[in-house]
């Protein structure tokens, strides 16, 4: 069952399904450096908005006309 957590960065409430799998956070890709920084700065999960700040952005291929 999902739990409600408080973001360690901004204190916003968000839903977490980490204990059961299929959590929204599994959709983010983080570099090793970003993971190290998050572990050093925060003691628990971040909300989707804050975690997105640390995620690797996968650029979309431009359309070739």
Image (tube, rainbow, N blue to C red):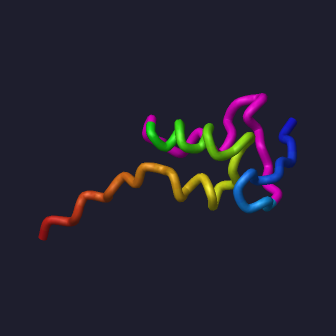
Name the residue: 31% across, 58% down: 60
Q: Nearer the viewer, residue 10 or 16?
A: 10
Q: Outermost residue, left direction?
A: 65
* Residue drawn at (51%, 52%) of the image: 54
Q: Residue 21, how many percent across, how many down?
A: 70, 30
- Single out the residue that lies furthest toward the bottom: 65
Q: Residue at x 53, y 58 (%)?
A: 53
- Residue 9 in percent (x, y) is at 70, 56
The quadrant the C terminus occupies is bottom left
Q: Is residue 25 magenta?
A: yes
Q: What is the span of residues highlighted in magenta in the rendered image?
A: 13-32
Camera-side residue of 13 and 20: 13
Residue 8 x, y percent position in the rendering = 74, 51
Residue 63 quadrant: bottom left
- Looking at the image, residue 59 sits to the left or right of residue 33; the answer is left
Q: What residue is drawn where x is 49% and y is 50%?
A: 55
Vertical order, 38 against 11 (above or below): above
Q: Is residue 10 above or below residue 18?
A: below
Numbered disc total: 0
Choose top left, top right, bottom left or bottom right for residue 42: top right
Drawn side of residue 54 relative to residue 19, left or right? left
Question: Residue 64, relative to residue 58: is it above or below?
Answer: below
Quarter of the rendering occupied by the N terminus = top right
Left or right, residue 40 beside residue 7: left
Q: Is residue 21 on the magenta stretch? A: yes
Toward the top, the furthest residue is 20
Q: Quadrant of residue 45?
A: top right
């Amino acid at each position: 069952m999902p739990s409600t957590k408080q973001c360690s960065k901004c204190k916003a409430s968000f839903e977490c399904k980490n204990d059961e799998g299929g959590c929204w956070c599994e959709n983010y890709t983080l570099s090793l450096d970003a993971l190290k920084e998050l572990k050093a700065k925060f003691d628990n999960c971040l909300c989707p908005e804050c975690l997105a700040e640390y995620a690797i952005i996968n650029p979309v291929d431009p359309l070739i006309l």
